[in-house]
Image: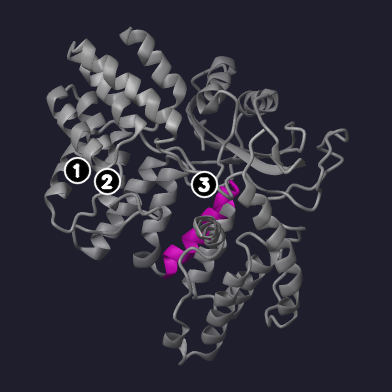
Amino acid sequence: MFNFKNMSILFKISRIWNVLLCLAMFSCVGTTTEEKYYNDLGEIRFDEKLDDINFKLCHEDYTFPFNYGGVGLVYTGEKRELEKTYFDNYKNTRIEGQTGFITIRFIINCEGKAGRFRVEEMDLNLEPKKFDDTISTQIINITKSLDGWQAYEYEGITYDYQQYLTIKIEDGRLKDILP
Amino acid sequence: MKKLLYFLILVSFQMSIFGQQNCEILKDNSKCYRACLIMNEESLFRQGSFESQKHLSDAIEMCPTLSNAYFEKSVAYLKRGRFVEWKMLMDKAVELNPEKHLSYRAWCQFSFLHNYEETIKDLNQLSVIKNTPFIGVGQSGDYDLRMVLALSYKFTERKEKAIDIIETALQDEDYYVGLYDYLHLGVLYLENNQLEKAVNSFQKQIEENELAEVYYYLAKTYHNLEKELEAKRSIERALEMYNKGRKMHSNYYQYADQIYEKDILDLQKKIG
């Protein structure tokens, strides 16, 4: 388990801060309809059509991005192990025009398990596109099989956080794993 | 005190990244002036919180030409891997004020997405607009943007061009020498089989900023030069530095030429 004390303090303060400052919201003049969420733009709500009901979060209203607070990507065996899993399991087939990015966003829960996977596919101009199922299905399945994630723990309490991985594909071939 | 300072840096990093805009210059336009004030209020909230994004949306609605509001709103999407939304907002910021926002879009395409052709397009466009050799510094503050351009050429198989850009830039008295410049130049020389030049560049990097990566690539170079004793010493030093945490690291992306423990151990086995 990785530990970063300031992250927890930060979010505790931010929670209080948000409550105290929410009054300022009422003084806002604008009328825009904003995407609703509990705490953070990157949180992923449970969707009964997509998600495993047995995948539980400790703090449903309180997830934070993996890259906040000084930790970054944490995976057993570091980035090289993660890359190896993709490159060992992905079947490279040249398919012209199958180029762009597949981003998978998900949650690492307080038990260090991954769930609530959401997929976004883009071309190199970062406009939405649909990859062949043979490509996207492989990427999603490999991502779901990754088992080196670690829970975030502070003072005996474990938290849930948001993770993403972006896979760069060039003419059907695996090119890069990000971040 | 040190802890407090670190904490404040963390908090500030999750807030508005460009600081507050001077709204006084918009005083002649009452709607945009008010929008600017609302945009600046956003910095009271954590980046990516509902309150923060709502302030920015309201500012955009009130003054659709306020480029900074699109830019600030985009950042929270970028850091969460929501690149489609990030790009739509950044494109709008660039459309409204290319001189101000092209460098950030280029930097993000480079560091977060390794989208090198798009980086090259943006930086070349910025060069035309600025019409000066110095076009700015990457958002992290680690690089002169000419280094970012050079590395983008390197990763699209134009290594000679990359070397030429860096060598020329280093002659410029306005060049902003970054934390890893001589490392990247050394790696380029190594890959181009200019081994003596690579060693010199790595030695300069050690003088400027000693880290695991430079010893790793130095070991590789010495190994290619068949200087096995120096190679062995360098790879041992690389592992020592890595274990001490003296290595390239970002919470957000992987650096060009960044290495991991496995890379060091593999090379150590090869060197023997």
Residues A14 and B39: in front is A14
Q: Amino acid at mark 1?
A: Ile
Amino acid residing under circle 2: Met
Say what secondary structure mark 1 lies in: helix
The Cα–Cα distance between marks 3 and 1, rounded to whole angstroms, is: 29 Å
For the residues bearing labels 2 and 1, Cβ distance under 8 angstroms: yes
Mark 3 element type: loop
Q: Which chain letter goes with mark 3?
A: A
Q: Chain of mark 2?
A: B
Q: Quadrant of residue B237?
A: top left
Task: Locate residue A6, reporting x and y percent.
Answer: 62, 51
**Circle 3 is placed at which residue position?**
A126
Residue bearing mark 1: B166
Identify the magenta region.
Answer: B78-96
Q: Main secondary structure of the magenta part?
A: helix
Q: In the rendered structure, does residue B79 fall within the stretch colored magenta?
A: yes
Asked where in the image residue B73 lies, by quadrant, the reply is bottom right
Pointer 1 chain: B
On the image, numbered disc 2 is attached to which residue?
A: B147
List x then y, in percent, for residue B97: 40, 69
Compare residues B105 and A82 and report the one nearer the observer.
A82
Q: Position of residue B7 (x, y in %)?
A: 56, 57
Residue at mark 2 to residue at mark 1: CA–CA distance: 6 Å
Quadrant assignment, res A139:
top right
Q: How many marks?
A: 3
Mark 3 neighbour density, 10 Å: few (under 14) some (14–19) many (20 or more) = many
Q: Please give left or right for residue B156 compared with residue A74 in the image.
A: left
State the residue at coordinates (18%, 10%). Answer: B226
Whether residue A41 is visible to the viewer of this picture, yes or no, is no
